[in-house]
Image: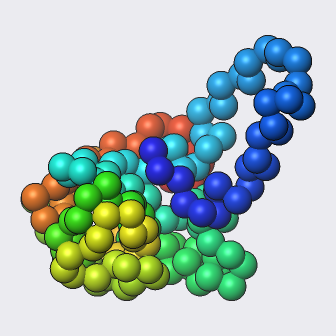
């Protein structure tokens, strides 16, 4: 799972091997619901590229975005479905920013906004992609839904804990 820069920057670098601390007991696994990115992220796998798709909500907005954008993303995701899209292709990739969501026989078209390199066309290997896709309707998170992009798709089936954490 590729983590957005906002998360990577929160982890201090490991000490040099010469200063490594003595062996410690492994950290306990996070409790269910402790990491909103795990709870609300799915991946679309392509040849040479994995696209992370995050369902933006009050919990994920806190982790993904800086204060000014965090508040607008939290407010927007309360009214409509918002996806955060992120990935770095390992080889040149022909990206389409056309995303749809299918739920219970209904299809919604998304509107894409680029944060970085989230544009239709060839994306060079190693170029990070960041973008937002807004949908006019809100999906029912208690029911499965499928996000489609180009030839790839991924189904979201949220856990009972993930649904409860959002107050639904």
Question: Quarter holding the N terminus?
Answer: top left
Residue depicted at x 76% and y 47%? 13
Q: Pick the residue in front: 39 or 158.
A: 39
Query: Along the horizontal axis of the image, is 158 left or right of 76?
Result: left
- Residue 81 showing in the rendered view: yes
Given residues 110 and 23, the one toward you in this image is 23
94 up-or-down from 145: above or below: below
* Quarter of the figure with residue 124: bottom left
Determine which quarter of the picture holds residue 14.
Answer: top right
Horizontal and vertical percent for residue 19?
89, 31
Regarding residue 143, the answer to whether it shows in the image is no
Relative height, residue 65 to residue 55 (above, below): below
Q: Quadrant of residue 100?
A: bottom left
Residue drawn at x 49%, y 73% as measured from the top left = 77
Q: Relative to residue 54, is residue 37 drawn left or right?
A: right
Of all residues, the one furthest to the front in this rendering is: 18
x then y, percent, for residue 135: 31, 77
Judged left or right of residue 25, residue 148 is left
* Residue 70 sits above or below residue 152 on the image: below
Q: How is the image coloured?
A: rainbow
The residue shown at (58%, 49%) is 36
* Position in image of residue 31 (x %, y %): 65, 30
How far from the left and from the top, in percent, is residue 65? 62, 72
Count the numbered circles shown: 0
């Amino acid at each position: 799972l590729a983590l957005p820069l906002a998360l990577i920057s929160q982890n201090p670098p490991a000490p040099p091997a010469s200063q490594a601390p003595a062996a410690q007991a492994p950290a306990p696994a996070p409790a269910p619901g402790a990491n909103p990115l795990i709870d609300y992220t799915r991946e679309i796998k392509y040849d040479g590229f994995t696209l992370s798709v995050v369902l933006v909500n009050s919990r994920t907005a806190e982790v993904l975005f800086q204060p000014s954008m965090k508040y607008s993303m939290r407010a927007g995701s309360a009214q409509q479905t918002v996806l955060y899209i992120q990935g770095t292709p390992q080889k040149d990739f022909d990206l389409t920013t056309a995303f749809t969501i299918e739920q219970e026989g209904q299809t919604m078209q998304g509107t894409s906004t680029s944060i970085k390199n989230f544009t239709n066309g060839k994306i060079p290997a190693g170029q990070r992609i960041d973008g937002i896709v807004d949908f006019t309707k809100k999906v029912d998170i208690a029911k499965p839904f499928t996000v489609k992009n180009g030839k790839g798709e991924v189904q979201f089936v949220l856990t009972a804990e993930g649904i409860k954490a959002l107050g639904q």
